[in-house]
Amino acid sequence: MLMGNLSRLLKESWALVEDQQDKVAGYFYARLFLTDPRLRDLFPVHMDVQRARLLGAIVHAVQTLEDPEQFDSYLRALGRDHRKFEVVGAHYDVVGAALVEALRTFAGEQWGWEYEQAWKDAYAVIARKMQAGAAEDDNPPFWHAEVVAHQRYGRDMAVFTCRTSTPLDYRPGQYVSLESQYHPRVWRAYSVANAPRRDNLLEFHVRALGAGWVSGALVRRLRAGDPLRLAAPMGDMVLDRRSARDIVCVAGGTGLAPIKALIDELTTYNRTRWVHVFLGARDRDDLYHLDELTQLAARYPWLSVVPSCSEDETFTGERGHVNEVMSRYGPWAEHDFFVSGPAPMVRGTMRTLSELRVPSTRIRYDAFTEW
Ligand SMILES: Cc1cc2nc3c(=O)[nH]c(=O)nc-3n(C[C@H](O)[C@H](O)[C@H](O)COP(=O)(O)OP(=O)(O)OC[C@H]3O[C@@H](n4cnc5c(N)ncnc54)[C@H](O)[C@@H]3O)c2cc1C
Ligand code: HEM
């Protein structure tokens, strides 16, 4: 009841400023950097209002996390992750105050104490959980790594490996966020493409997206010897070793990366679970690691790989979107599913799986893009 009321107040008050979001954001950051000029150093150099992520992220969190208790583990992980931005406890109060002041300034006369209290309360709960998550983490805020090898594939892809100076514990299928010297303080998530190794090598697969900043630099500029920073692993697209079910992996483009890590893990112990990999791409050029996968399938009898192209008339294998191709095989009612790639591909696959009546509890997925 109380939660419902808070949520109503937050939504009503946000409606007062919603069409002035750019101005609210401009004011918010100005307030923040005036209060504590050192905070500017935590943010990327180029920060036009459209791209400024923090305010949008906070408003989104406050608006959608109707019951923060339900999102406890997400918020703790977010707080842990914020250590990579060099955020410390004291910053939370400054950000909270700037947020409320920006809202009050643009909401006009209809802003009232109830609205103000609602934002303060919601922000305080979220901030507390994030800080608790940060405090209980014994890991370093980030790991230093050095690029060991970098290879371009096709028009816009690259596979590179780097070595961390100290071990970074992660589970195959997880992703880390990564920062390069080409865009300091700009972090983006990339899935690790191998299971953890004793020599601390991590492989990444990247596609340069349109005008994308980080992906463009990782594909076109990164060189062996370059330094990188990696932050704590996240994500739950990991194997359940207790499950005896056979496995279907559906990957689009560089969505292959976490799937490769899962296969890498399976090669260390699997004898009993069939693993079917459906690998989708636009054209043959985009099937950048097909030869390597085919070699793995030749070595491990439990592994099969079906490549497909959606826009290549000359491709002699399966044609069509990868979810359609996957549904032509089967039946899949008793399998565990792992799905990764661009959002439209992930959405399409989830639709297909729902039509095939696969329970959502058997599906793990990561969408790489927002739309
Ligand atoms: C859990 C997770 C795991 C991920 N793993 C990987 C991975 O293993 N490999 C990988 O390559 N990426 C992965 N990503 C995506 C990655 O984090 C970045 O979002 C991506 O590389 C783009 O970052 P950027 O800085 O280059 O683009 P940004 O500068 O953030 O902006 C995106 C820009 O790129 C363009 N753009 C964005 N999306 C599209 C699109 N769909 N089509 C056309 N143009 C577009 C637009 O011009 C936009 O301005 C993952 C994302 C998540 C959330
Ligand atoms: C309720 C509190 C907060 C929430 C919900 C929140 C949430 C988020 C989210 C979801 C992102 C995007 C992450 C990403 O793109 O990888 C982000 C980015 C960021 N946050 Fe927070 N955050 C909070 C508090 C803070 C505080 C107190 C600071 C300290 C100044 C801070 C600094 C940053 C920075 C520097 C970025 C990166 C911005 C960019 O790349 O443009 N955040 N935040």
Image (tube, rainbow, N blue to C red):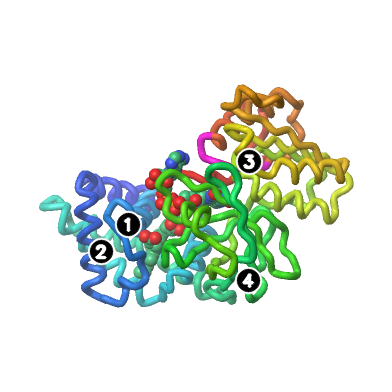
Q: Residues within 10 Å of mark 4 (few under 14, many from 20)?
A: some
- Write down the quadrant of residue 168 in the picture: bottom right
Quote the CA–CA distance across marks 4 and 2.
34 Å
The yes-or-no answer for disc 3 within 8 Å of ligand 1 is no
Q: Would you say the residues marked 2 and 3 are in contact, meaning their CB atoms lie under 8 Å apart?
A: no
Q: What percent of the width, then of the height, locates residue 246? A: 80, 39
Circle nearer the N terminus (4, 3): 4
Q: Nearer the viewer, mark 4 or mark 2?
A: 4
Q: Quadrant of the C terminus?
A: top left
The circle on residue 248 is none
Q: Amino acid at mark 1?
A: Ala
**Secondary structure at numbered mark 4:** strand
Residue shown at 61% from the left, 58% from the top: 150
Note whether 57 is above or below 198 in the view shown. above
- Which residue does the numbered mark 4 point to in the structure image? 164
Real-space CA distance between mark 1 and mark 4, rounded to the nearest whole angstrom: 29 Å
Q: Which residue is mark 3?
A: 339
Magenta segment, which residues?
Answer: 338-344
